[in-house]
Image (cartoon, rainbow, N blue to C red):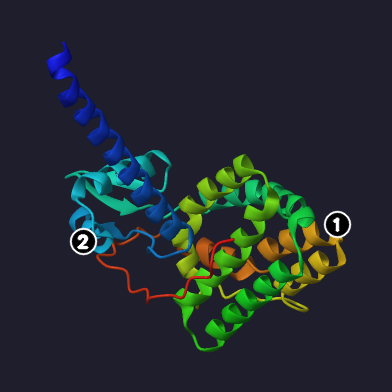
Amino acid sequence: MPASAPSTMATEKSSVTRSSLTGQVYRTLRDRLMSGRFQPGERLKISTLAADLEVSETPVREAILLLTNDGAIEMKAGYYFLTRRLSLSEYLEIRRLRLHLEPMAAVEALAHTDPAFIADLERIHATLIRAEEEKDYPQAVQSNYDFHFSLYRRSGMPQLTEILERLWIQAGPLLNYLYPHGHPTYEGEHQHLRIIDALKAGDAAALATAVEQDLIEGGEQFVAYLESIDHEEPEPVKKSSAKSVRRSPRK
């Protein structure tokens, strides 16, 4: 009936607005998960997140449920949420996928890089090294994420990037174990520098190898630490101790 049209339109508009807000909250929380802003086993309070993001609790709750479907968060009895701490076997499965997909993304990005972009990567890497030296571990984890996804998002392959993001949101909280427990070490120079050199040279094979070895060689101590705690029952973390971090601009 014509008289009901304005009400229907208002309802539809409200639904679209809420859906859009849920999407924004989902992307923000997904970004925080990928960059290690949440600890493994951290309890996520909807009211606290809503206050932090300056939104109502409804879009936060809906975003949390989406992330639960993504395998990044688990719902416990009593209707509370924790970030998942992957088992060793789960992490190793994700790493196998990353070893195939991340070199591919980097090689695809090669055609879309330029000196300005490479200079940005160099700055991000310098921030990473400085953070490691200053033991600013939250910033180091953030800079590592910024380095890799600045490159992968240059691939021009949004489906591939989306797959990588879904893998990283599950493994992201574990990255807090990189420092100091699984500090990346390298026999020669840092693999990030080899990635940068390969980009400058336009060498696809060297680029793929550097990305792969960054995960294998750089992650050797990290995997050893995950092995050492794999049979321990994780204790819920009430609040992340992570410091604020400086975000690199997304390209």
Q: Residue furthest front?
A: 2
Question: Which residue is found at the position 43% from the left and 75% from the top?
Answer: 245
Which element carries disc 1, helix, strand or loop? helix
Residue 245 shown left or right of residue 58 in the figure? right
Residue type at tag 1: Ala
Looking at the rendering, which quadrant does residue 109 occupy?
bottom right
Relative image position of residue 130 (x, y in whole percent): 57, 85
Please give the label number shown on residue 205: 1
From the image, which quarter does the N terminus lie in? top left
Residue type at tag 2: Ala
Total number of numbered discs in the rendering: 2
Q: Which residue is mark 2?
A: 51
Q: Between disc 2 and disc 1, whose residue precedes? A: 2
Relative image position of residue 196 (x, y in whole percent): 76, 70
Question: Which residue is found at the position 59% from the left and 61% from the top?
Answer: 251
Residue 23 lies, with reference to residue 109, above or below; the image says: above
**Residue 181 appearing in the image:** no
